[in-house]
Image (cartoon, rainbow, N blue to C red):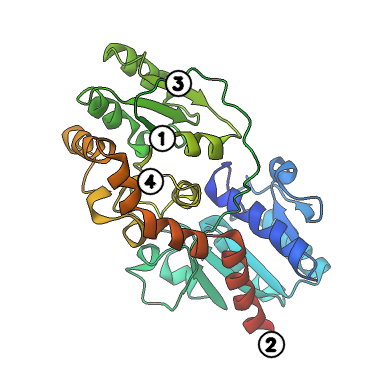
Amino acid sequence: MVASREHGELEKHVADLSRWQAHNTNAQVSVIAHPRYQNTLDQRVNFIPLNTDRSRHHPTLIWRLANHIRAGGFQIAHGHGSKSAQLLAAVQKYTDARQVITRHNVRHPRDKLASAFDARIAVSRSAVANSRLDWNIIPNGIEVKWQASAPLDLQLSPEPKALVAARLIRLRGTEPLLQALNQVSGVQLIILGDGPEKSALEQQSRELKLDKRVIFVGRTDKASAFLRTADLLVILSRNESPPYALAEALQNRCPVIASREGDAEDYVPPEYLLDNLDPAHLAKKLRFALTNKDRLHKDFSTAFERAANELSLDNTARAIWRVYAQLVS
């Protein structure tokens, strides 16, 4: 179950996980979500529409969710995110399904709510560092398809290329990155993604006279192609677990500089971790990473191999399936 309003990494995880389960197990796999998510799911996944935009306290929402779970005869009900957890907790006394919750960030669901579930999953150790409960730590993995990529419809310079792939909101830290780029010559920045701050960031790049060095691509389905073209991915998210972008970059053998959030420290060498988002600090890290590409790829060789083994969708999905199996055995 997913009860959010975004089309971000949590929602992608639910779509990927349900697809894997539908194709690799004999289980009846269903997703309960708002109708806007139906076209993101695999055809083998049974979709159950539910208007989750209503308040979590809405009696009709809780009643309908309980009816859906009873009618489906589900053995497992797996909620992703805080609102899903709150809704599943509200229907516990009306259903027989064993309940699982996944915590995708460091704040929600909190321990008081999470303690009510039969099993708990967290996408990183840092997401539950302050929790007193037992959690199954299962990083979000991705599926990388290695077919030949379509050519990019862009004129890219021969200069070193840094890449950002994120929703363009203030919390993502893209604004200080533009300020840092103004202190580093000879680097091109490619920004994938859209969001409410895009216009402001485009205006900032013009004011800094960076508009010829910064390319705003917007939403794209060619993220892997961009990662194979870029020399470096920059991850600036604050107070979040490691995003899909980290796993996707490492599986595409693209080095990363990243904030010390989530379990980035498990995969990113110390020299490439960010202590803060001060523009001068970002500029220093960019110069260090991009002045010696041979050293850069050598430093990340172990991380590339670990990611291939540990951050795959198959590895993640099998670990989650084992949690389910333990509950129903």
Look at 43% across and 34% down and name the residue there: 230
The amino acid sitting under disc 3 is Leu
Instruction: Kindly report the distance in space between the C-alpha atoms of the residues bearing marks 2 and 4.
Output: 42 Å
Answer whether labels 1 and 4 touch (C-beta < 8 Å).
no
Q: Which mark is residue 255?
A: 4
Q: Residues within 10 Å of mark 2 (few under 14, many from 20)?
A: few
Give the residue drawn at x 55%, y 62%: 86
- SS at badge 1: strand
Query: Considering depth in this image, is 72 or 265 the residue closer to the camera?
Result: 265
* Residue 31 point in image, percent of width and height: 72, 57
Q: What SS does tag 2 mark? A: loop
Q: Give the amino acid type for the residue marked by disc 4 in the picture.
A: Pro
The crowd level at tag 3 (other Cα within 10 Å; few <14, some 14-19, many 20+) is some
Q: Which mark is residue 156?
A: 3
Which of 284/42 is in front? 284
Viewed as shown, does residue 258 lie left or right of 41? left
Q: Amino acid at mark 2?
A: Ser
Compare residues 161 and 117 and report the one nearer the observer: 161
Residue carrying label 2: 329
Distance from the alpha carbon under mark 2 to that under mark 1: 44 Å
Q: Earlier in the sequence, mark 2 or mark 4?
A: 4
Residue 127: quadrant of the picture? bottom left
Q: CA distance from mark 3 to mark 2?
A: 55 Å
Residue to which mark 1 is pinned: 164
Where does residue 75 sit, x and y in percent of width and height? 73, 75
**In what element is the residue under mark 4?**
loop
